[in-house]
Amino acid sequence: MELESELVTKLVLPEGIPDQWKENTDFYTYLTKLGGYSVENLAKEVDRLSDEKAGILNQTQQLAFANYKTFIQTAECSRQISKEFNKIEACLTSLVDGLPQLSASCEEFAEASSRIKTSRRLNTLTLTRNAQLLQVAEGSTLSWIV
């Protein structure tokens, strides 16, 4: 049966089976069905497929006409979404480009904050020791005067 399927396939499709059809079980089922047809049925199958194609084309046109407004709105929405995605992409690119500068600025801020913290701690210590420093200063001034 496998050899028969291969022969039918080569007769029907001399250039080979398209890749997207190779994994489609419906394709092989239809091929088997065609293999069982008589010559008269094969001739009718061509007409049946032509009629089915015309019917599907007609249904597609009716669907397009009936839903024209929806198709237009969908296209407009898709266009708007595409514009918004482009804006977002531009903003993200700008953000990514600015991150190194932001990182450097944050490091500078951290260093400056550390220096301020150290100065503040020294000022606080000086303030708490203010009375002692005044006593030492007054004592040394008096000893110079005497």
Image (cartoon, helix red, strand yellow):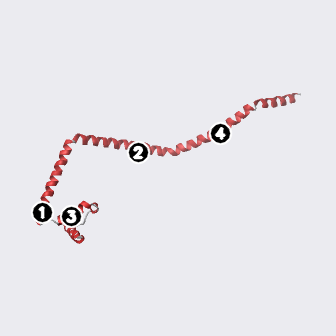
Residue at image mark 1: 41
In the picture of the structure, the residue carrying the numbered disc 4 is 115
Q: Callout 3: helix, strand or loop?
A: helix
Q: Position of residue 13 (x, y in %)?
A: 21, 65
Q: Which mark is residue 89?
A: 2
Q: At label 1, which amino acid type do we have?
A: Asn
Above or below: residue 123 compared with residue 98: above
Quick check: 30 above or below 78? below
Q: Nearer the viewer, residue 121 or 17?
A: 17
Q: CA distance from mark 2 to mark 1?
A: 58 Å
3 or 2: tag closer to the N-terminus: 3
**Residue at 25% from the left image edge and 64% from the top image edge:** 17
Q: What amino acid is found at the position of numbered circle 4 in the picture?
A: Arg
The percent coordinates of residue 36 (x first, y second) are 16, 66
Marks 4/2: CA distance? 39 Å
- Name the kind of residue labelled 2 in the image: Glu
Q: Position of residue 129 (x, y in %)?
A: 76, 32
